[in-house]
Amino acid sequence: MAAQTAVTPANLKLFSLVILIVQTTALVLTLRYSRTQSGTKYLSSTAVVLAEILKFFTCIFVLLRNHSYRWSSFQSEVHQEIFSSQQKVMDALKVAVPAVLYVIQNNLLFFALSKLDAATYQVTYQLKILTTAFFSVVLLSKSLNLALVQMPSDDSKKTVEHDSSDSLLGLGAVLLACFSSGFAGVYFEKILKGSQVSLWIRNLELAFFSIFGGFFMCWLYDWEAIQLDGFLQGYNRIIWVVVFLQAYGGLVIALVVKYADNILKGFAVSLSIILSSFMSWLLLNDFTPSVMFAVGATIVILSTFLYGYEPHQYRPIHSA
Ligand code: C5P
């Protein structure tokens, strides 16, 4: 009889990490490509909000499926988990904090990828490993071994032709996004692991608040343009792929945080640097890797290994 592969948390952890590597690479490349296309530019604030709407309906779909598509049973879970006590309502409201941060962060990343090439963006965004580690220690009281993270050297950027003020703006946006990513990621992990409420209910709450935050950003930055040329101006197939990757990537991240943690998530994303840099060079002709870039990327990846590495507990070996 053929042995069946059991779905264990360890399998899910590996599976979600592999999916995350593929998703991150695909998202960074398509997003960068979408920002460098000629013709009518799409509004990134609308892409962020559409991804949140997609996440919201996906969460409803998954929850409904868990209830064998019985609406009343789904409704009673939502009521039980969110509205049944004041404590639960307060708990749900806490999700608004990472929701608002993620909306700002997602908008910043669209901006950064219109200023920086995919590889430079990926490597500098790795600084979020440090901010995540910092907030993991502060908010989750995790203890971590010291590891080294290196920013890409200037030489790695010499190969890229960019206006230097553009690059500075892009780097500034990435820096802000790193802080948001670290805090929001760890705060969400704390909420997720600190109660029995299911991942999908938490994601539903996150998407719900993010939709409001996302529309607010559309109004703040692009209201005039939206009134003039519509919400979906400049959309083509590539932009829809970006919206889908952004939405489902977010949900994969939620799975990684549940089955692994935020630091291992950083490790998965680091591996995607190698893939993105290689594909960016191959497909977008956007970036030529230099020796210094390779050295910088290797150091970042090694650092992530050090963070992700959990020494085995010593266990005495018993004879059978
Ligand atoms: O780079 P970082 O890992 O911080 O990116 C987090 C991304 O995942 C954001 O785009 C955020 O909107 C999304 N996310 C999500 N659902 C979660 C956690 C994160 O959609 N539960």
Image (cartoon, rainbow, N blue to C red):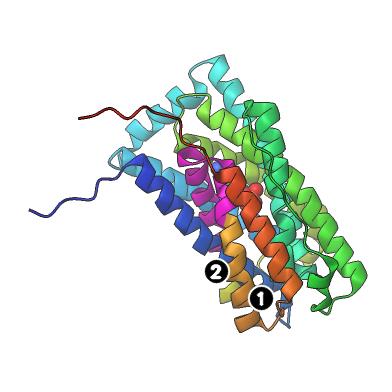
Up the image or down, 90 lies above or below 245; here it is: above
- Horizontally, residue 185 falls left or right of residue 198, namely right
Most frequent secondary structure within the magenta stretch:
helix
Q: Quadrant of residue 122?
A: bottom right
User: Which quadrant does the C terminus fall into?
Assistant: top left
Of 11 and 49, which appears nearest the observer? Answer: 11
- Looking at the rendered structure, the kind of residue marked 2 is Val
Residue 129 screen position, x and y as percent: 68, 47
Q: Which residue is mark 1?
A: 33
- Please say if 242 is above or below 249: below
With 182 as the anchor, is 14 left or right in this view?
A: left
Residue receiving disc 2: 241
Residue 149: x and y in percent read 72, 51
> Within 10 Å of the Cα at label 2, are there few (<14), some (14-19), or many (20+) other Cα atoms?
some
**Residue 75, percent across and down?**
40, 32
The circle on residue 118 is: none
Q: Residue at x 65, y 62 (%)?
A: 298
Please tell me which residue lies in front, 192 or 159.
Answer: 159
Looking at numbered disc 1 in the image, what kind of residue is underneath it?
Tyr
